[in-house]
Image: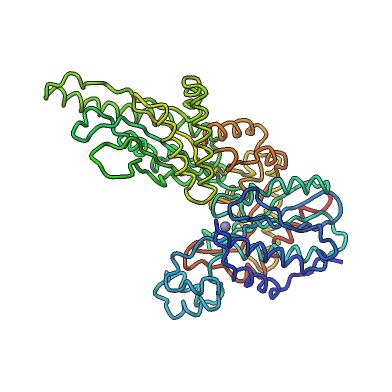
Amino acid sequence: MTLQTISSKKILDIFYDYVRINSETGTHSENKASDFVSGYFSGLAYFQTHPDRFGRFALPEDPFGRSVVWAFVKGRGKKTVILMHHLDVVGIEDFLRFKGHAFEPDALMHELKGSLDVLSPEAREDLLSNEWIFGRGTADMKAGGAAQMAVIEAYSELENFEGNLILLAVPDEENLSAGMRGALPLLDLLCHRHDLDCVLMINSEPHQRKTRDIGLFSGGSIGKIMPFFYSRGILAHAGKSAEGFNPIGLLSECIQRTEMNPALADFCPDSGEMSPLPTWLMARDGKTNYDVSMPLSAFGCLSMQPLNSHPSDILLKLKHMAMEGAIEAVERVNYGSGRYNERTGRKSGSKKWQARVYLFGEWLKMMIETCGQPFETVYAGTLKDICHRIGAGDITYATGTRMLMDALFEYTGCGEPTLIIGIVPPFYPSVSYLGRPDFKKTLTDLHLLLDEASRHHQGPAYDLEAYFTGISDLSYTSIKPEDLPAFRMTISHEMPLYGGLYTIPFDLIAGHAMPCINIGPWGKDFHKLSERVLKKDLTIHTPHLIQCALEHMLKSI
Ligand SMILES: [Zn+2]
């Protein structure tokens, strides 16, 4: 029995049912999408014969009780390809008066045709062409999900095929990737139980095009790291500013040196790809009410998306820039206060500040050595309390980190202006076939094969990029063995909230390291009102390319 072409109707049926579920990320609604996926598999003959080959794997201590849905189709041998997609979608804040139809593509498109002025000229043209399907989650990524489910069904009808398939439908991708991080122990379990060898992970996020006629595969995924800067000053009444040190000045020196600084972005000459430039996602003081005092602290988070820089190198670079900024901030304050005190004849208040800059890990070690057990007790107690509040959804990881730093300084006190740099969750390692000779051949061969298969099938030509730049769960598919100790150490030491609530199973990622590729439909305007997916990719090209990739990867050599 050979693999049949999957009918367009089958894919559209799955797709519309899947889109209809509002599985907004970071909410209980994601469970409705999990119900749908597991319900679909439970209706297939294969899984009725083998009820132990699909199921739901609960995320531990998840505040929304979410789970990863999985399905395993067993063939011959050890070779296994994993099809992975996320089942959550982003919110619909910008759907204006069309919120009621966000999850009903036909009704939404009908309404939009009567309100063309809300769309860009390109979106308008696409809507009127009837070649695109609009709606929240259509492109990102129920289309890719539907194609993967249909492919699993097609393979489940084969007898004794070469290789094995696993499907993972994960929650929380648009948020903190709790789903993918939580799926790794499940993958480990399945590999041990069935003696599997994972040879490739396929994600099916939508791809964007630079040129209309050229599709895009990604052979990796960009990283994401969010360093925080906590600046602690010396409080003074604003009327006695020469006696204090405002932490905002210190933080803003750091912001000026890093915001949109190309020296902090990676460039990859092999592929011509570059990290988006770093930008600050938030920066604020620690004041909660108005009074005429300087704030005691200021806190900000910088978003960076590395291609190949290691977290430890990034932090050292930032520390160096922050030290230069701190010197300038301190010199300015010392000069101003000195002049003020001179002119007003105040001798006693002319203290010269000296700024201190630390990475969180080194500062923590120093405090434990200086303050001993009582400090450790305060740290553990505050951390527990903050994690509880994050778990309950009361505060974000960034707020929790700021509160923890405030509480620690509350205990230790601070005699000089101090700046601490660390990391706020989530952390996505950057992965790519570049720099991994073992993956490079697999990916370049696969690219050539799929490009030819697509053109043979009246589809577009395809380029291969080294990094999917939209941030994806593929980040958790591999870590180079030589990077493992440094990654684990940097993240666990420099991320104050690491452990318990937020962890990354680095050992499992390294243990099951495999090449990855994104094979998805052409999509546009993800997360916007005009989100849309190319119908022909959904119904024909994407499932066909996934099938070609599977046949190639699973065949025995
Ligand atoms: Zn997505």
Residue plotted at (48% across, 65% down)? 92
On screen, residue 202 versus residue 336, left or right, reads right
On screen, residue 332 versus residue 265, left or right, reads left
Q: Is residue 472 above or below residue 43?
A: above
Q: How many numbered circles does the render carry?
A: 0
| Colour approach in the figure | rainbow
Q: In which quarter of the image is residue 172?
A: bottom right
Q: In which quarter of the image is residue 88?
A: bottom right
Residue 85: horizontal and vertical position, in percent? 64, 57
In this orientation, which residue lies closer to the viewer: 16 or 479? 16
Q: Is residue 424 above or below residue 70?
A: above
Residue plotted at (64% across, 72% down)? 17
Ligand number 1: quarter of image: bottom right
Image quarter in which the N terminus is found: bottom right
Residue 206: horizontal and vertical position, in percent? 58, 60
Residue 455: horizontal and vertical position, in percent? 67, 64
In this orientation, which residue lies closer to the viewer: 405 or 450? 405
Residue 553: horizontal and vertical position, in percent? 76, 52
Q: In this view, does 225 lie above or below 130?
A: above
In this orientation, which residue lies closer to the viewer: 309 or 428? 428
